[in-house]
Amino acid sequence: MKFLADESIDRQVVDRLRIDGHEVRYVTEMEPGISDDLVLSRANQEMAELVSTAITQHLPELENAFVVIVPGSIRIRRSDL
């Protein structure tokens, strides 16, 4: 799973998440001091890229379908319409 950890998160938590195999982007390592709005913007930007890639890869399957997109997985349930 991917995380974006703000500066208020202790390094110990970030290290543990990484040891457990998670991808963690840590504001302290990237851009210390950025505003909360910018942190949220960065997280949304990464999610937008994930959704865009999933749509591009599965476009023919998406019409009349229920779709759930999460990091590492896409679930497509076709409608019987």
Image (cartoon, helix red, strand yellow):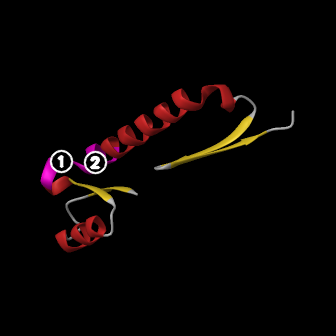
Q: Is residue 65 above or below residue 63?
A: below
| 39 part of magenta stretch | yes
Q: Amino acid at mark 1?
A: Ile
Q: Which mark is residue 4?
A: none
27 on left or right of 41: left
Mark toward the start of the polypeptide (1 vs 2): 1
Is the C-beta separation of discs 1 and 2 under 8 Å? yes
Residue under label 1, please give it.
Answer: 34
State the image quarter where residue 8 is shown.
bottom left
> In this orientation, which residue lies closer to the viewer: 49 or 6?
49
At a point 27% along the width and 51% down the height, the residue shown is 36
At a point 34% along the width and 61% down the height, the residue shown is 22
Q: Amino acid at mark 2?
A: Val
Q: Position of residue 61 (x, y in %)?
A: 68, 31
At a point 42% along the width and 42% down the height, the residue shown is 47
Q: Position of residue 37 (x, y in %)?
A: 30, 45
Label 1 element class: loop
Label 2 element class: helix
Task: Estimate the spatial distance between the alpha carbons at disc 1 and disc 2, rounded to whole Å.
Answer: 7 Å
> In this orientation, which residue lies closer to the viewer: 39 or 57?
57
Q: Is residue 1 above or below residue 38?
A: below
At a point 20% along the width and 74% down the height, the residue shown is 12
> In this orientation, which residue lies closer to the viewer: 73 or 64?
73
Q: Position of residue 73 (x, y in %)?
A: 53, 49
> Callout 2 environment at 10 Å: few (<14), some (14 to 19), or many (20+)?
some
One can see residue 33 in this view: no
User: In the rendered view of the protein, which quadrant contains the C terminus?
Assistant: top right
29 on left or right of 77: left
State the image quarter where residue 26 is shown.
bottom left
Residue under label 2, please give it.
Answer: 39
The magenta segment: 29-40
| 4 part of magenta stretch | no
